[in-house]
């Protein structure tokens, strides 16, 4: 197997980020046609509770997604693995690292399309702690 040089790996990361950005843009368009705005406590936190807290913070201590901790670790907080990005940028799902970072391939299917749409709609609506 051939090892990729640093410039080539950076190119692959850029392509992955572009693809993820396009997926988020598509979600934003779909969300615009939906009815009610998701709420953090009622709609977003249950996604984290059911699908994310087994690894966050256990395997990834830099991001605690447990109830009562997750909001403070997400909104307007720099991503530990990419400090130039914020995890959640209120009103801008297309710039929120939570949605645009390339997922670990073994975890790619953890969040469903509906889960991602709910999170993106919450961010688009201002990422309120409600």
Image: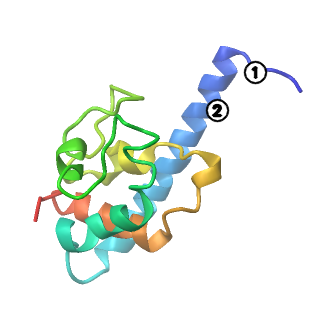
Find residue 84 and report its image quarter.
top left
When the figure is inspected, residue 104 is found, relative to residue 112, above or below; the finding is above
Question: In this view, which residue lies farthest toward the right?
Answer: 1
Residue 45 position in % (x across, y down):
27, 64
- Residue 106 percent coordinates (x, y): 64, 51
Residue that label 2 marks: 12
For the C terminus, the image quarter is bottom left
Tell me: residue 130, above or below residue 24: below
Which of the labelled discs sits on residue 21, or is there none? none
Q: Are marks 1 and 2 in contact (CB under 8 Å)?
A: yes
Residue 89 x/y as whole percent:
23, 45
- Going from N to C along the chain, the mark reached first, 1 or 2, is 1
Report how far apart the C-alphas of labels 1 and 2 lie in the structure.
10 Å
Hey, which quadrant is residue 13 in on the image?
top right
The N terminus, quarter of image = top right
Q: Which mark is residue 4?
A: 1
Which quarter of the figure has residue 127? bottom left
> Can residue 20 be seen here?
yes
For the residue pair 94 and 84, the one nearer the viewer reads as 84
Mark 2 residue element: helix
Could you tell me how many numbered marks the image carries?
2
Q: In screen coordinates, is 53 left or right of 104? A: left
SS at circle 1 = loop
Whether residue 39 appears in this view of the structure is no
Q: Residue at the spot x=44%, y=55% of the render?
A: 54
Few, some or many residues within 10 Å of mark 1 (<14, 14–19, 20+): few
């Amino acid at each position: 197997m051939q090892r990729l040089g640093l410039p080539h790996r950076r190119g692959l990361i850029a392509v992955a980020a572009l693809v993820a950005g396009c997926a988020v843009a598509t979600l934003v368009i779909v969300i615009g046609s939906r009815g009610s705005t998701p709420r953090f406590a009622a709609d977003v936190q249950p996604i984290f509770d059911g699908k994310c807290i087994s690894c966050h913070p256990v395997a990834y201590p830099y991001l605690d997604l447990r109830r009562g901790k997750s909001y403070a670790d997400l909104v307007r907080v720099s991503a530990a693995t990419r400090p130039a990005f914020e995890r959640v940028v209120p009103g801008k799902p297309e710039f929120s690292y939570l949605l645009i970072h390339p997922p670990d391939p073994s975890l790619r299917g953890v969040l469903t399309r509906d889960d991602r749409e709910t999170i993106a709609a919450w961010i688009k609506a201002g990422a309120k702690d409600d």
